[in-house]
Image (spheres, rainbow, N blue to C red):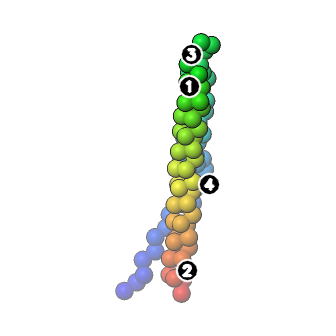
């Protein structure tokens, strides 16, 4: 029985997922600018708006970190599999 090798293309192009998260973060700031409380609005609007913007950005950053962790794990697994196939 011959060992099978799996090849995957090496991508050094744009990280589309990362770009998508950056665009989403920019949209949070744009929407926050429009929603910024006007004089005379209740005082609780500003901290709630800032909290919502911050949690949205933190959520996107967390998902992107998880994506990077998965990519690193996949590369490590591929490297280990290649190492075993070479021996």
Rendered location of residue 43, percent (x, y): 59, 22
In the image, which disc is placed on residue 69? none
Is residue 15 at all visible to an observer of this figure?
yes
The quadrant in which residue 45 appears is top right
Depicted 33 relative to depicted 23: above or below: above
Rendered location of residue 48, percent (x, y): 55, 30
Residue in the picture at 54% in, 34% down: 52
**Mark 1 or mark 4, earlier in chain:** 4
In the image, which disc is placed on residue 44? 1
Q: Work out which residue is located at the far top of the displayed protein and give it.
A: 40
- Please tell me whether mark 2 or mark 1 is closer to you in this view: 1
Residue topped by disc 2? 83
Residue in the picture at 59% in, 12% down: 40
In the image, which disc is placed on residue 41? 3
> What separation in Å lies between label 2 and label 3 (alpha carbons)?
63 Å
Q: Work out which residue is located at the far left of the displayed protein and give it.
A: 1
> What separation in Å lies between label 2 and label 1 (alpha carbons)?
58 Å
In the image, which disc is placed on residue 12? 4
Rendered location of residue 5, percent (x, y): 46, 74
């Amino acid at each position: 029985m011959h060992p099978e090798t799996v090849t995957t293309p090496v991508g050094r192009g744009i990280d589309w997922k990362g770009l998508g998260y950056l665009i989403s973060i920019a949209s949070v700031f744009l929407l926050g600018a429009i929603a910024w409380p006007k004089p005379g609005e209740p005082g609780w609007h500003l901290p709630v708006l800032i909290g919502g913007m911050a949690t949205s950005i933190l959520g996107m950053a967390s998902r992107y970190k998880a994506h990077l962790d998965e990519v690193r794990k996949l590369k490590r697994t591929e490297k280990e599999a290649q190492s075993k196939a070479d021996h």
